[in-house]
Every structure is written in structure tokens, then in C-alpha cells.
Amino acid sequence: MFATLLQIRTGGTDPETALAVVALSILSVLLSAAIAVVLVRGYRRGPGRTGMLTLAVGLLLLTTVPEILRIALPTATGVGVVRRSLLVSACELLGLGTILWTVYGGESS
């Protein structure tokens, strides 16, 4: 029913599953962006809180940007599956590295 209303075409799966995947992707992007906003607000409260800003960047690189890449690259470009996987994995690793640097080796406040 929803597929008819939204004119969704899926390849290899039923429309309800495709809608659930899209909804979960949107939810994960919104939640990680909300957490990043809280971290940026904490950074803006005073000097010496640069760790909160780098933690927000790491979180966005770990969750938000890869999720957007997973959807945007095949939709807007002709990037293949392997190249998309490499870009997404590199972004996630950069995010993890940023978070680890913040927790263990970042600037001391």
C-alpha cells in the first residue's frame, strides 16, 4: 500500500523492507547529528573544550557521513559498489581515528 502511494520501485526486496531500511538510515543520521549538536554546544560553553568539537567531528565521520555516502553515491553518481565501499570504510576509519585521538591523545584541557 505504501509503495503504491510513494511510487517506490525496489530491486530484489519487498517495498516494506526497503522503506524500513530508509527509515532506519534517516533515524541514524538524525540521532548522530543531534548528538553532534549537543557536543558542539558543550564546546561553545567555554575555552579548553576542543575535545568536544573533535569528538563531534569524529562522530559525524563515523555515522552520518558514511550513511549519506551509502545513499547519495549510487543515487547521484556512477560510483561502483567496490569504490563506494572503500569510500565509506575510509570515512568510518577516519571517524574512529578522530574519536580515538580525542580520547587518548588529544589536546589536554
Image (cartoon, helix red, strand yellow):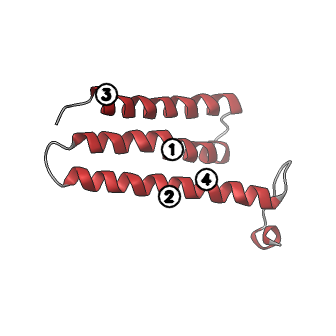
Q: Residue 38: which numbered mark, if any?
A: none
Counting residues from the N terminus, which is met first, the one under dot 2 or under dot 4? 4
- Residue 101's x, y, as percent? 33, 28
Amino acid type at circle 2 is Leu
The alpha-carbon separation of the residues under discs 4 and 1 comes to 10 Å
- Residue 65's x, y, as percent? 50, 44
The alpha-carbon separation of the residues under discs 3 and 1 comes to 20 Å
Amino acid type at circle 3 is Tyr
Q: Residue 30: which numbered mark, if any?
A: 2
The alpha-carbon separation of the residues under discs 2 and 4 comes to 9 Å
The alpha-carbon separation of the residues under discs 3 and 2 comes to 27 Å
Would you identify the image quadrant in which residue 41 lies?
bottom left
Counting residues from the N terminus, which is met first, the one under dot 3 or under dot 1? 1
Q: Residue 104: which numbered mark, if any?
A: 3
Marks 4/1 in contact by CB < 8 Å: the verdict is no
- Residue 2's x, y, as percent? 78, 71
Foreground mark, 3 or 1, reads 3
- For disc 4, the marked residue is 25
Amino acid type at circle 1 is Thr
Amino acid type at circle 4 is Ser
Q: Quadrant of the C terminus?
A: top left
Counting residues from the N terminus, which is met first, the one under dot 3 or under dot 2? 2
The alpha-carbon separation of the residues under discs 1 and 2 comes to 10 Å
Residue placed at 84% from the left, 49% from the top? 11
Q: Quadrant of the N terminus?
A: bottom right
- For disc 1, the marked residue is 63
Side of 1 where 56 appears, left or right: left
Marks 4/3 in contact by CB < 8 Å: the verdict is no
Residue placed at 52% from the left, 28% from the top? 90
Residue placed at 67% from the left, 43% from the top? 74
Counting residues from the N terminus, which is met first, the one under dot 1 or under dot 2? 2
Counting residues from the N terminus, which is met first, the one under dot 4 or under dot 3? 4
